[in-house]
Image (cartoon, grey):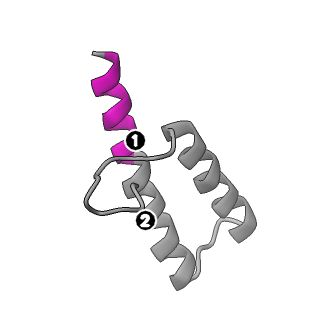
Amino acid sequence: MSPNPLTPGPVRSASAVNEQIRSLWLRAGGHLTTDQRVEYERLVTEWAAAVRAEVVRAA
């Protein structure tokens, strides 16, 4: 997501965020702690925004 809430929109590509999600799961060994779950939810939200932005740009 954008670091500045006044300029909405993803900064990173969906593939970059997806790679971070995969890395989180790999480090966690498939079992997320509470803190990791919060990070995962933030990343999934960022990934979804990035996918939407990529679809809009492609249209």
Q: Residue at the spot x=36%, y=46% of the render?
A: 48
Q: Residue at the spot x=34%, y=17% of the render?
A: 58
Q: Residue furthest top?
A: 59
Would residue 37 be found to the left or right of residue 16 on screen?
A: left
Image quadrant where one finds the C terminus: top left
Q: Which mark is residue 50?
A: 1
In which quarter of the view is residue 55 placed? top left
Q: Is residue 50 magenta?
A: yes
Would residue 12 be found to the left or right of residue 52 on screen?
A: right
Going by the numbered disc 2, the residue's amino acid type is Arg
Would residue 39 be found to the left or right of residue 28 on screen?
A: left
Residue at mark 2: 42
Q: Which residues are magenta?
A: 48-58
In which quarter of the view is residue 3 placed? bottom left
Going by the numbered disc 1, the residue's amino acid type is Ala
Magenta part, dominant SS: helix
* Chain-order first, disc 1 or disc 2: 2
38, above or below 58, in the image? below
Q: Which mark is residue 40?
A: none
Q: Is residue 43 magenta?
A: no
Residue 50, how many percent across, how many down? 40, 41
